[in-house]
Each structure stands twice: as structure tokens, then as C-alpha cells.
Amino acid sequence: MKAHMDEFYQKRILPFFEKLIEEGKKEGSMHPDILLDSILFYIQMFKEAFAKPGFFAQTDPSMLRDLDHLLYCGIVGKLEIEK
């Protein structure tokens, strides 16, 4: 099962993220100078942390909220909400 999931990740998920990141850079919603490999590495760190058994059950909800913000906005970024 793990081999199947790894193959799916390599063939479907990674290409999806690569396309999404490149589109985000073109639209100006992502910093154009940050390398694709750096962004994918950053996402991989979150993927590995979230995959640990019991991570969500053992993690304080406020920390989960903060991690969500870090993933989408970075340390100094603000989440802009359209009105």
C-alpha cells in the first residue's frame, strides 16, 4: 500500500503542486524568487509532521491553527480575506 501511495504522490500530487506553485508565482500570490524545490521541501516537512501517528489527536488546536497559518502565509505573511 505504501508503494502505491508513494507512486501516486510522485505521479499525481507533486505535478499538481508544481503547477499550482507556478500559477501562483505568475499571478503574484507567491513570491517569484523562491525556488520550486524550496517550496516543495517546505510542504514535505508539513506532510511528514502530519503523517506521524496521533499528531492531530495530541496537538493543541491553537497550535494546529498556527501551523495552518505558517503553511499558507509564512512567518510574517497575512492571510488576505476577500470581502
Image: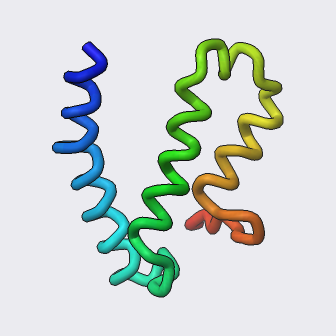
In x, y percent, where is residue 70? 68, 54
Instruction: From the viewer's perspective, tell me whether residue 83 is left or right of residue 1.
Output: right
Q: Residue at (32%, 56%) from the top-left corner?
A: 17
Q: Residue at (21%, 33%) from the top-left corner?
A: 8
Quarter holding the C terminus is: bottom right
Instruction: From the viewer's perspective, tell me whether residue 24 is left or right of residue 60.
Output: left
Q: Nearer the viewer, residue 40 or 67?
A: 40
Q: Nearer the viewer, residue 5 or 65?
A: 5
**Residue extending farthest front:** 3
Instruction: From the viewer's perspective, tell me whether residue 9 is left or right of residue 65.
Output: left
Q: In the rendered image of this protein, does residue 79 appear above or below residue 54?
A: below
Q: Quadrant of residue 73?
A: bottom right
Q: Residue at (82%, 35%) from the top-left corner?
A: 62
Q: Residue at (76%, 45%) from the top-left corner?
A: 66
Q: Nearer the viewer, residue 26 or 9?
A: 9
Q: Quadrant of residue 49?
A: top right
Quarter holding the N terminus is: top left
In x, y percent, where is residue 7? 20, 33
Q: In the rendered image of this protein, does residue 68 appear above or below residue 1?
A: below
